[in-house]
Image (spheres, rainbow, N blue to C red):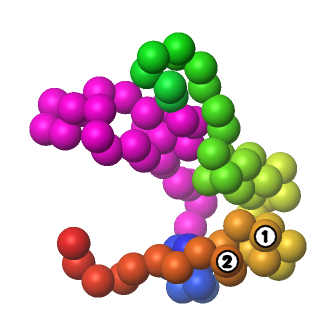
Amino acid sequence: MAIAASDLPFERYYHWCFVDNWEWAEGESQRFGIVALDYETQARTVRDSGRFLAQVIADGGVTRASHARFVAPQAYSTEPQ
């Protein structure tokens, strides 16, 4: 996570969307909630990003263990989209 790697002091993080939802521009194609939504059944499943956020809250920040479990295995693009 770029924020965690930056060593900048930050006190808050706001995630755009708790659960996948319908977007005016993209319909149901973009999925970026920390909880996945099955539109057919309305079943909700917590994603790894949701588990990571829960761990950060429980630990009061990003720990080495949570970084190793959730962040290190990921590849994040820093290029503009």
- Residue 66 seen in this snapshot: yes
Badge 1 density bin: few <14, some 14–19, many ≥20, Cα 10 Å: few
**The residue under label 1 is which amino acid type?**
Arg
Q: Amino acid at mark 2?
A: Pro
- Decide: is 71 above or below 55: below
Residue occupying the point 60% across, 25% down = 44
Indicate the position of residue 38 as horizontal and vertical percent values.
50, 25
Query: Which residue is label 2 attached to?
Result: 73
> How far across and down, in percent of the image, does residue 7 sit?
60, 85
Query: 61 or 68, which is in the foreground?
Result: 68
* Residue 57 highlighted magenta (yes or no): no
Distance from disc 2 to disc 1, alpha carbons, whole Å, reads 7 Å
Q: Quadrant of residue 69?
A: bottom right
Answer whether labels 2 and 1 touch (C-beta < 8 Å).
Answer: yes
> In this orientation, which residue lies closer to the viewer: 38 or 4?
38
* Image quadrant containing the N terminus: bottom right
Circle 2: is it few (<14), some (14-19), or many (20+) Cα within 10 Å?
Answer: few
| Label 1 secondary element | helix
Name the residue rendered at 78%, 77% in the picture: 68
Range drawn in magenta: 8-36
- Would you name the residue on which mark 1 appears? 69
Residue at x 29% of width, y 40% of height: 29
Q: In the rendered view of the protein, which quadrant contains the C terminus?
A: bottom left
Looking at the picture, does residue 22 appear above or below residue 2? above
Residue 8 seen in the current view = no
Q: Is residue 40 above or below residue 64?
A: above
- Residue 37: image location, x then y, percent: 51, 28
Say the numbered circle drawn on residue 78: none
